[in-house]
Image (cartoon, grey):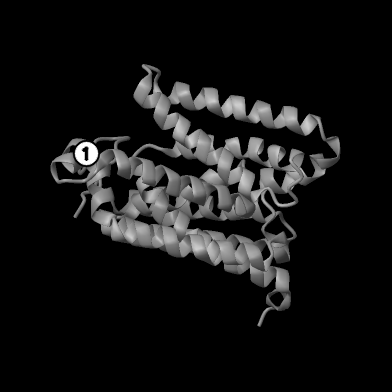
């Protein structure tokens, strides 16, 4: 057994990475296919207001305020999308900048907590406790079960909301539930990679899988595996190399993306697709 596996903090960190890496990879397949990467980024950055508000209210662990703020921002995005003529990226840009500014203002009122912000901005998975491991396990079971039970519905919803509606899928409610599931996952994964990098765990594994997958089933399985390899491998590499865990996880996944891109280019027939255009992955 490697020496670093004998340390309790590394065992906890690897367990959390083991649980959340594949979960984010699976969830990310639908996030990227539905073009919600900027949505997840907006939700992640709104966590700064949750962290600052939690500190201001006296929370030692601001996880609950982060969940409340992130969920509120996510639901507000959907509400504004339905009730106004604003474009999606405009709504998200306004809320992202507003929540970050609110977080900075609240932190300026309590300068003694500035040093605590680093682990939420850039991740500090090595400091997670057994309570965090328990939360990660619960979220993985609940969210993973939801995704697998509703896999067909989500695939239809991703392909076409009109098609899903004709097939009897409650489109509006599924959209709201999916957004809440995404928000909870993002909020709890912040301890792994931090506010700045958390979107990479949702985006890079499915993007990597898409480079080599031939259908949705392959993309899901590959994204699960790549999320696990990137998260666990990045945490394991960060210890002997004395590197910060969050950025190391992201760079590990980025290296896998480059490798898959080269493999995909090598496998692709020159005449099969137009230059600079990727074929849509069939649902079956």
Instruction: Name above or below for residue 245 compared with residue 157.
Output: below
Nearer to us in this view, 201 or 76? 76
Query: Residue at 80% across / 30% down in the picture?
Result: 108
Residue 88 as seen in the image, left or right of residue 110: left
Give how far across and how far down residue 33 sits, in percent.
33, 43
Q: Secondary structure at mark 1?
A: loop
Residue 108 as seen in the image, left or right of residue 90: right
Disc 1: which residue: 160
Give how far across and how far down residue 28 sits, in percent.
41, 49
Residue 245 as seen in the image, left or right of residue 189: right
Query: Residue at 64% across / 50% down in the picture?
Result: 63
Asked whether residue 138 is in view, the answer is: yes
Query: Residue at 53% across / 22% down in the picture?
Result: 94
Give how far across and how far down residue 44 sits, in percent.
56, 40
Nearer to us in this view, 194 or 146? 146
Give how far across and how far down residue 10 sits, in percent.
69, 69
**Image quadrant where residue 88 sits:** top left
């Amino acid at each position: 057994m490697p020496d670093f596996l004998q340390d309790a903090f590394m065992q906890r960190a690897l367990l959390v990475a083991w649980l959340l890496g594949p979960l984010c990879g699976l969830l990310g397949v639908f996030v990227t296919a539905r073009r919600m990467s900027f949505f997840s980024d907006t939700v992640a950055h709104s966590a700064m207001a949750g962290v600052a508000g939690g500190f201001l209210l006296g929370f030692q662990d601001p996880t609950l305020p982060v969940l409340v703020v992130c969920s509120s921002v996510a639901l507000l995005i959907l509400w504004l999308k339905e009730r106004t003529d604003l474009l999606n990226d405009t709504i998200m840009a306004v809320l992202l900048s507003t929540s970050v500014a609110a977080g900075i203002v609240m932190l300026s009122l309590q300068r003694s907590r500035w040093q605590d912000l680093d682990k939420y901005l850039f991740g500090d998975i090595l400091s997670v406790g057994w309570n965090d491991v328990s939360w990660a396990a619960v979220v993985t079971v609940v969210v993973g079960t939801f995704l697998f039970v509703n896999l067909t519905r989500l695939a239809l919803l991703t392909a076409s909301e009109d098609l899903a509606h004709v097939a009897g899928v409650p489109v509006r409610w599924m959209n709201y539930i999916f957004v809440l599931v995404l928000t909870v996952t993002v909020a709890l994964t912040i301890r792994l990679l931090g506010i700045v990098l958390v979107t990479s765990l949702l985006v890079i594994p499915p993007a990597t899988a898409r480079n080599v997958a031939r259908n949705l089933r392959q993309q899901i399985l590959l994204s699960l595996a790549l999320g696990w390899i990137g998260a666990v491998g990045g945490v394991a590499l960060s210890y002997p190399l004395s590197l910060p865990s969050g950025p190391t996880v992201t760079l590990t996944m980025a290296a896998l993306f480059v490798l898959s891109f080269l493999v995909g280019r090598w496998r692709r027939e020159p005449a099969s697709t137009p230059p600079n255009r990727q074929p849509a992955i069939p649902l079956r």
